[in-house]
Structures are given as structure tokens and as C-alpha cells.
Image: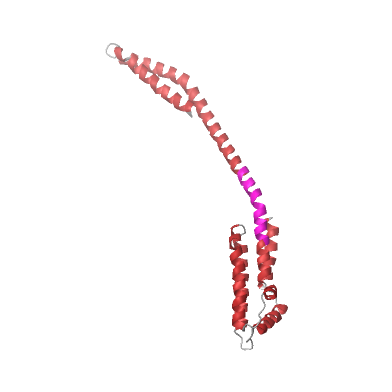
Amino acid sequence: MSNVKNGIFSYFINILKIIVAYKHILYFAPLNLIYMALEDKILEIVTYTLPSLITGGVAFVLLQKFFYNEEQKRKFELLRENQKQALPIRLQAYERMVLFLERINPINLMMRVEPTTLDAPSYAALLIHAIQTEYDHNISQQIYITHDCWEVIMKAKNSVIAQIRTFSLEENCQTGEELRTILLTELTQTESASAVAIGFIKEELKRVF
């Protein structure tokens, strides 16, 4: 870049020198001789400076391309290194969300949280509180997993909560023990939402990793 600028600057400086050098003959020599002399001098300057300008321009283009390629290579290496470092963290995030889904599975949840003497609505509230607590402990994991996967996990969580609330409001469900019995019966006949979400995570891990 500097060669190109210096060549152009020298070019115009030489033109000015020509004008100054021939200024003293403007009043004495015929105009056609002056023009011929100027043309010869300008042609001489162009002959010497043009190759330098071309060489400088080519060098500038080549250097610019070289620096661009080096910058792209550096970015690629940095991206690859970051992905390499982030891989264990991402895998850990998927593992934690699988554990979360296992823990909010109503069957596993009701084994940890017993109804004791609670009525159905109170037991349902206790189960939902346990689910929400588990969720709060894992909410930051959404940074490391895909948006689609997180959406599936959220739908599974909300589905389990809705299922617990729905059965707790049935007329034949008065106590916490009755609610647990109804939920266990229902889940033996259908696949839980958390199990469906775990299946989705397994398939995504095959695609992503």
C-alpha cells in the first residue's frame, strides 16, 4: 500500500518540477516546443514510475489476500478449539437434563415424595413444587443444548405438571394416596412425557455428536 502511495506522490512531484523547470522559457520559446518538451518529460517520468505503480498495486493485492486468508485460518482454528473445549460441557448438560427428566417422571417422583396424610390437591402441590425445584437447579443448562431440545424438555415438564393437576381434581381422587394410585395406573398404560423427551435427547445426541 505504501509503495502505491509513494509512487503516485512521486509522480505528481515530478510533474510539478517539470512545470517549474520550464516556467522560465514560457515567454521565450514557441508553445509547440514547450508542449513537446513537456510531453517528452512526462513520458519519461511515466516510463519510470508506471512499473513501480503496477508492482506496488500487485504487491498490495497479494498481501491483502494473504492477510485475509491468515485471518480466516486463525478464526477457524479458534472456533475449532472453542468447540473442542465446549464439547465436555455440552455433553454434561445433556446428561443433567436426562437426569432431570428421570427425576420428574411421576413414578420416580412419587417414590421420593410420599403423600403421607395429605389430601389430593395438597399432594399435587407438593409434587409440582418438587418438579419446579428440580427445574430451577437445571435452568442454566439451556445455554449448552439446542433450542429444539430445550423446547421438548419444557413441554415434558409442563405435561407432567398438567397431568398431576388434572388427576388431583377428579371426583374419585380425594387423598394423596388415591392420587398416587391413579397416576401409577395411568403411567403403566401410557408412556410418560419425560420418557418421550429422553428419547428425543438420545436421537439428538446421535445427530450432533
Specify whether 190 is left or right of 55.
Answer: right
Above or below for 72 versus 8: below
> In terms of image quadrants, where is residue 132?
bottom right
In the foreground, 194 or 76:
194
In the image, residue 161 above or below residue 40: below
Query: Which residue is at 57% across, 39% downward?
Result: 71
Q: Nearer the viewer, residue 57 or 69?
A: 69
Q: Which residue is drawn at 69% across and 59% down?
A: 205
Residue visible at 37% across and 14% down in the picture: 37
| Whole-percent x, y for residue 152 in the image | 62, 67
> Residue 43's quadrant in the figure?
top left
- Residue situated in front as seen by the camera: 192 or 100: 100
Q: Total marks drawn?
A: 0
Farthest residue, direction front: 117
Span colored in magenta: 77-95
Residue 129, image quadrant: bottom right
Residue 149 colored in magenta in the image = no
Which x, y percent locates residue 75? 59, 43
Question: What is the chief secondary structure element of the magenta stretch?
Answer: helix
Q: In this view, does 75 lie to the left or right of 49?
A: right
- Relative to 186, is 73 on the left or the right? left
> How was this image coloured?
secondary structure
**Residue plotted at (70% across, 79% down):** 184
Quadrant including the C terminus: bottom right
Q: Residue furthest left?
A: 27
Any part of residue 196 in sight: no
Tell me if residue 80 is in the magenta stretch.
Answer: yes
Residue 68, given in percent of the width and then of the height, sits at: 56, 38
